[in-house]
Structures are given as C-alpha cells and as structure tokens.
Image (tube, grey):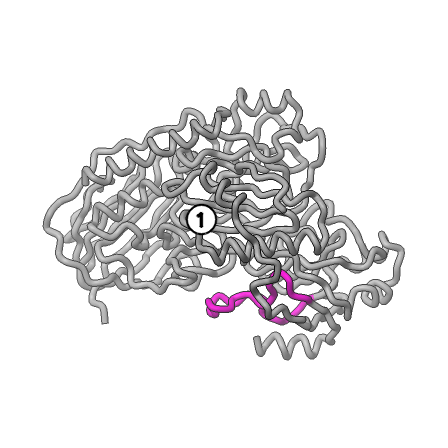
Amino acid sequence: MIKNISNLGDAALYCDFGNDVDQKTNIKVIKYFENINKKNIDGITNLTPSYNKLIISFDLNVVNFTELKKKIEDIEISESYIRQDQKIIKIPTCCDDEFALDIERLSLKLNLTKKEILENYLNKEYFCYMTGFIAGMPFLGDIDKKIRLERLETPRVKVPKGAVGITEQFTNIYTFESPGGWNILGITPIKIFDQKNEKQPILINPGDRVLFYEINKKEYIKLNEKE
Amino acid sequence: MKKNKILVLREGINSTFQDLGRNNFYHIGLPFSGAMDKRNYLIANKLVGNKHNEAVIEFAYQGPLIKIEDGNINFAISGDIKFNIKKNGKLMTGDCYKNYNLSKNDEVDIISTNNSVYGYFAVSGGFDLKKNFESFSTYVRSNVGANNGKKIQKDEKFFINDFKDMHTNKSLKYMNSKIEYIRILKGTNFDYFFEQSITELTSKEFLVTKLSDRMGMRLEGPKIKNLKETNIRSEGLIKGVIQVPADGNPIIMLSDHGTIGGYPKIGAVISADYDRLVQTPPGKKIKFELIELKEAEKLYKLYQMETENLLSQI
C-alpha cells in the first residue's frame, strides 16, 4: 500500500502513499501508523502520520535505513483499525466579530455574507486527518467548497490560543498561541491539549469526527473560566 | 526535604532544563526537543558523575547567574563558555570541562558563549524536577517538560538531588571543532528546485540570521528558486530538514521544530553534523556539501566513536 519508501536525512524513512488528500488515503496511513506503533520495532523513535505520508524516525545507533526499509516493506497490516473508539467531538465556538478575525476577508473574497459562511461551516462533521505542528492541533476536513480560501498572504505573528481557522478544504484549532496563516472565524474555550494528562493529552485523534457549534460570548467566557 | 538549593539571580537567555529529549510523541505534535548539542550535554553530565540522561541547564549566548542558597553543589560547564566563580567571596575565572565544588552563598556567573550558541550547566545528582511525557526536556511552545514547560526565570529556586561528595577532580581536554561545512543529503523535494539553485546551495555561503532559535535556523544567501510548487501538502518533519518557503530563504528545522510543515524539503543535515550546526551563531556563514546516504552513515559511526572516546577520558 506504500507507493515508495525513501530516506529523509540519514535517520528517517519517508513513506509515500501518493498525492491524494482524501479519507481513503489517510485511513491507510493511520492503519500503518497504528500497526507499526503496536509492533514496537527496535530503533524506531517517532512516527509522524499526515494526509498521505508517514515519516518513521529511527535511532541510527540501533538500525539503518536499508534494514528498517526492509522491515516496513514486509510488515503485515491488519484490515481493521486498532483503535476502536473513534468518536464525534462537539466543539463550542464563539464566532462574534471580535473573535472572527478574518470573517470580513472571507466574506469579501468568497462573496458570501457572514451568516452564509457560518451556516456553511457550523454543525457539520469533519474528519480528523492528523494532529501536530503544535501539540494537539487537529487538521480537519473537508469543508464545503463554497467557503474554501487560501491562507493569508502574510501570516499572523500571533494567532490566539483556541482560534478556529479554515484554509483550502481544511479547518483546525490553534491549541496554543502560535504564528499562523489560516483564516480565523471563531474561538473555542475548550482545552484540546492537556499536558497534565499524559495518558490522554489530546482531545481529538486522527480518525475522529469533529463538529463546531456556535455559542455566544457570555457562554464562551463562562466556559473559558471553567477550563 | 532536599538540602542543596540554588537561586537564579539572573536567568540568562533561553535557559531551560534539557535531557536527551522525548521519543514517540511526534504524532501528537510534540517534537524531540532535548539538548541541542548532544555531545556537550553528555560531557557535562559525565564530568559531574551523573547518569547520561540527567537534566542539565541549557543556555544560549548568556547563561544564568546562580547563587548557592543552601548546602553545596558540584558542577561543571561544557561548551565554549566564559564564566566566573565567586567562592568564599573571592572572584576567579572558571574553566569549561572541569568540575567545581561550591558552598552556601557562593556564585557562578555564566557570562557568555564564545563564538558559539549553547552551553550546559550540570550538577552532581541532577536537579529535583518532574518529568513530563517521559522527559525533563522543556518545550516552551506547548508548555511541556520540567519547570511547567517554561524557561528558567529570575528569582526561581531549584533543589538539587542528594549526591555523593566528589572530592576527586574530573576534567577533559576538548576543543569544540569550528564549522567548516555542513554535510547534507538530498531532500524529498530536491527536484522541485532549479539546477542553478542546487549548485548555489552547495557552493555559496549562507548567513545564519538572528531569526534562529531552538525551533529553527533561518538562513540568507542566494535565493533558492522553486520551479514546481512553493507549498506541498503538510507532512511530517524531522530535525535537520532544510525547507525552502516561497521567499527562497532556507530554514533548517531544529530540535523544537513544529512536527508538521508544508514547505518543500530541499535537503537534510546529516546526524553527525547536527551538534556543530546548532553551535553556529547568527552573523556567521555556513557552507553545505551534498553527500550520499552511505557516507552519512559512516560519518555518524565516526561521530559516535569520537563521542564515546571523549566520555571515556573523563
């Protein structure tokens, strides 16, 4: 199922599953990730699944590229998911103008009213392709074709923690204050990454489904204090 | 209650607790982290008789000013560092790669790094800290690691684990090798770039800019021109990867890098040259040499042998 395995540097395998970005391809990546993770192969230090690639980092003191490539090529992948608790996570989001930093830009570029944009975006289930960049950040999709827009030309130096953004076919949540270029249309008070909960630090895992629903500012402030 | 305690009178720049880093959390967005210059980190711990993965204080450019508030400590500093010691009220210049005993009210003033970036302050017994995600390493961006995932601040106090008094002196004769060139392997998007740009990447000098930290090193030089696509679908990253965004200025991913990125990868720095790379300060220039995987693997074995050889001399 892996189309090609090449080296990334001298201590990582770059497993290519093609160029398609869709759930079918991504589920293949997730299955490889789960299976390899479970097998505890000697020397593997990190696994990074993404839309259609899987990067396998290894300890050069234990194994090298050629040896590990052979092992991965020969690996048996079970048909079903290992993790069986995929869930639907509902994310309260406040889309008041003060938090919807790019709603004007979206409205102008997409030729839609603010209301139309939110109607197209909210209360729909999105699939989680991967998590990362910063701790726990989920890459979700696919959003309606009508509201797809490229990134900001100049990324923000600081996107606030909890900001909900869209770009192209994807949507995400900034789990920490961070630089970033996604179009921000709201904010959530929910903690997505909890460093104190080492067993279950991230709320949203690849394969999960996420739905955003609107709350008002009062509810946002109240929930924010609770978190 | 632990007896030995230090007080931070000045925090220095980017002073954090680091160990060998954390494995197996890339998929939730936590990078490897850990000491940037692994060799100097290992040497510092060995000089004070610690096990190899004990937490130390890593600092950049300027280190902390530390006062012994209670008890005593045995410490060593590694890197290319200028520092002073105030012992029984008497000021003296300190030497790297050597251990020192200090008592209550004595001070260590880590003034600056010489022509390098990182230095390490290790104490016998190690600091009394809590691990987070299986490591002490501080990853400031997501507040993960020792000290609540935060940089070391002025006026903070830290306890030091009990240790056997070390009256023996340990030292090492070691010169940090200065950079000549950094060896790289082809990246997964090598063919996205103009041939002329590839030639320039491997023949011209690149300036290390001030926009460099534990996350990444931004370079300036001849613009690397992309002939295919300036963005790729976001995918995993590893430390040492050289990404080239649309502006043509390469960025090298370092230990605290974002785990996912969407810029084409023109190359990756070999593991054997990583310690030397991260020690190149802003304002200095580096040159790249393109080599093959087999050679990189050999060079890593050599690097590893050298490191073990150095550690065995302590």
Residue that badge 1 annotates:
A44
Please, what secondary structure does the residue beneath circle 1 have? strand
In magenta stretch: residue A196: yes
Image position of B243 with respect to A185: above or below: above
Q: Residue A143 vs residue A84: left or right?
A: right
Q: Residue at x 43, y 34 (%)?
A: B277
Q: Residue at x 52, y 45 (%)?
A: A74
Q: Is residue B253 visible?
A: yes
Position of the C terminus of chain A by quadrant: bottom right
Q: Main secondary structure of the magenta part?
A: loop
Q: Residue B312 vs residue A127: left or right?
A: left
Image position of B200 with respect to B43: above or below: above
> Which quarter of the figure has residue A6?
top right
Q: Residue B259 vs residue B11: left or right?
A: right
Residue range of the region highlighted in magenta in the rendering = A187-209
> Which quarter of the figure has residue B169?
top left
Q: How many marks?
A: 1
Badge 1 amino acid = Ile
In magenta stretch: residue B208: no
Q: Residue at x 44, y 28 (%)?
A: B294
Q: Which is nearer the eye, B244 or B210?
A: B244
Q: Which is nearer the eye, B268 or B106?
A: B268
Tell me the chain of label 1: A
